[in-house]
Image (spheres, rainbow, N blue to C red):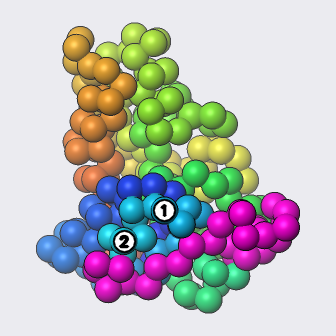
Amino acid sequence: MNIVVCVSGGGTNLQAIIDAIGNGTITNTEIVGVISNNINAYALKRAEDAGIKAICVSPADYPDREAFNDGLLEAVKDMNPDLVVLAGFLVKIPPQMVAEYRDRIINIHPSLIPSFCGVGYYGLKVHEAALERGVKVTGATVHYVDEGTDTGKIIMQKAVYIEPTDTAETLQKRVMEQAEWIILPQAINMIANKGKV
C-alpha cells in the first residue's frame, strides 16, 4: 500500500509512521510522499532524512483558496497513493479531494471524538479545553475524513489518563506518546493488511 502523509509542523506522527515501517510494526506499506502546507515544517526535513519525496504546497503560492485546493489535490494525485494520512495537517481538506479519495483519507485527532473536536480544536487548544472542562480521561482518535471536521467514521481510539498536575503541554506530550504514536501506525497497518475498516 502506498501512502502520502500530509503534515503542517514538526512531524512527530510522521516519524512514528517512518519508525513503525522501519521496525515492521507496519507492513505492506511505503510512504511515497510527504506534503506540507508550511515550507518551514520540520516534517519536510524528517522526510528528506528518510529518503522520502517531500514537497510544500502552500496557500501563499496560489491566488486564492480554490486554486490552492486544486494544487493540493494535484500534488496528492501525482503521488498516486492508496491512502492519504493526515498527521497534524492544519488544512481543511477540500470537498473534491474527499470525493476523489472517499474512505481513503485518515486523520489523527488528539482527543476521544466526539469530545473536543471540530472547527477550532487543534494542537494545544484541544488539551487546554480538556483541562478546562476537568475531564479525567482524554486520548486520541484515528478516523476517516469526510466533508465535516472530525466527523468521519472512527477507526481506532486510545484513552490516556489526565494527571492532576498536567499542563496543556505535558498532556499533549503524553497523548502523543501513549496514544497517537501507537494507534496511527496500528490503523495504517490494519488498513494495509485488511483493506477498509
Q: Is residue 17 left or right of residue 132?
A: left
Q: Which mark is residue 40?
A: 1
Q: Which mark is residue 143?
A: none
Please give the name of the residue rendered at 37% of the width and 83% of the height, measured from the top-left corner. 52
Name the residue beneath numbered marker 2.
Answer: 45
Type of amino acid under label 1: Asn
Type of amino acid under label 2: Lys
Query: Between marks 1 and 2, how big is the CA–CA gap?
Result: 9 Å
Residue 117, image quadrant:
top right
Q: Is residue 153 left or right of residue 194?
A: right
* Mark count: 2
Which range of residues does the magenta coloring cover? 48-73
Q: Secondary structure at mark 1?
A: loop
Percent from the top left, x then y, of residue 140?
A: 38, 41
Query: Quick check: 174 above or below 68?
Result: above
Please give the name of the residue rendered at 59% of the width and 44% of the height, measured from the top-left corner. 150
Percent from the top left, x then y, of residue 83?
A: 50, 74
Graded by Cα atoms within 10 Å as few (under 14), some (14 to 19) or many (20 or more), the crowding at tag 2 reads some
Q: Is residue 85 left or right of residue 190?
A: right
Graded by Cα atoms within 10 Å as few (under 14), some (14 to 19) or many (20 or more), the crowding at tag 1 reads few
Q: Please tell me whether residue 23 belongs to the stretch shown in magenta.
A: no
- Of residues 10 and 99, the one drawn nearer to the viewer in this rendering: 10
Query: Quick check: 166 above or below 73?
Result: above
Query: Quick check: 23 above or below 10?
Result: below
Q: Please tell me whether residue 61 belongs to the stretch shown in magenta.
A: yes
- Of residues 121 and 10, the one drawn nearer to the viewer in this rendering: 10
Please give the name of the residue rendered at 29% of the width and 78% of the height, measured from the top-left corner. 49
Can residue 67 be seen at all in this image of the molecule?
yes
Can residue 2 be seen at all in this image of the molecule?
no
Q: Secondary structure at mark 2?
A: helix
